[in-house]
Image (tube, rainbow, N blue to C red):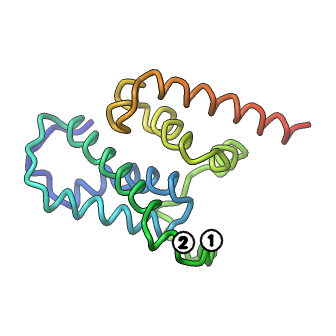
Amino acid sequence: MPEFRQDLPAKELLELYSDTVYRIAYSRTQNRSDAEDITQDVFLKYISSDKKWRDEEHRKAWLIRVAVNCSKDFMKSAHKRYTADIGELPEKAADESYEIEEKSEIYYAVKSLPEKYRIPIHLFYYEDMPIAAIAKVTGTKESTVRSQLSRARDMLKKILKEEYT
């Protein structure tokens, strides 16, 4: 974690957290373009916010919470409900800076999970967040996060087992 500065320049903020915010949005939407739009919205909210940060963890938690909320709002929006799914851009047209490093069987298995399980799995395994922090950021109880992680692990075991049999 970098040294905390209340007035972190936008460029440094983007370098630190844009991948995290994007991946959260992508895990929810499963669409690069939508995830990029949500990422922009999150950082616009940050820039227009006059919030004072206690420390770097507080800033990161706020960004994650806003990313989760913006993603939820997007998934409920009229735009999402009434637009045709035209699919993803071809791989070569995608912005490589947001590419998931490893597209293994696990990546595709996580991607196939129901929406409510992808965010906790992502935050726990990719962002190394403890269950208490995930509960706070997602606005759910710790027991709910534990249940979601347990169910998601069971689903992943089943999916991955089917691939190898």
Q: Which residue is mark 1?
A: 91
Residue pictured at 52% horizontal, 69% vertical: 81
Separation of marks 2 and 1 at Cα, in angstroms? 5 Å
Residue pictured at 24% horizontal, 35% vertical: 57
Q: In screen coordinates, is 64 left or right of 76?
A: left
Residue 114, compared with residue 165, is above or below; it is below
Q: Which kind of residue does numbered mark 1 sit on? A: Glu
> Residue 100: where, in percent of width, then height?
55, 54
Residue pictured at 78% horizontal, 33% vertical: 158
Q: Which kind of residue does numbered mark 2 sit on? A: Ala
Dot 2 falls on a residue whose secondary structure is loop
Residue pictured at 41% horizontal, 23% vertical: 142
Residue 89, compared with residue 131, is above or below; it is below
Number of residues whose C-alpha sits closer than 10 Å to that of mark 1, classed few (under 14), some (14–19) or many (20 or more): few
> Residue 138: where, in percent of width, then height?
38, 38
Residue 155, compared with residue 25, is above or below; it is above
Q: Are marks 2 and 1 in contact (CB under 8 Å)?
A: yes
Q: Which residue is mark 2?
A: 94
Residue 14 occupies which quadrant of the picture?
A: bottom left
Q: In screen coordinates, is 118 left or right of 141?
A: right
Q: In screen coordinates, is 122 left or right of 22?
A: right
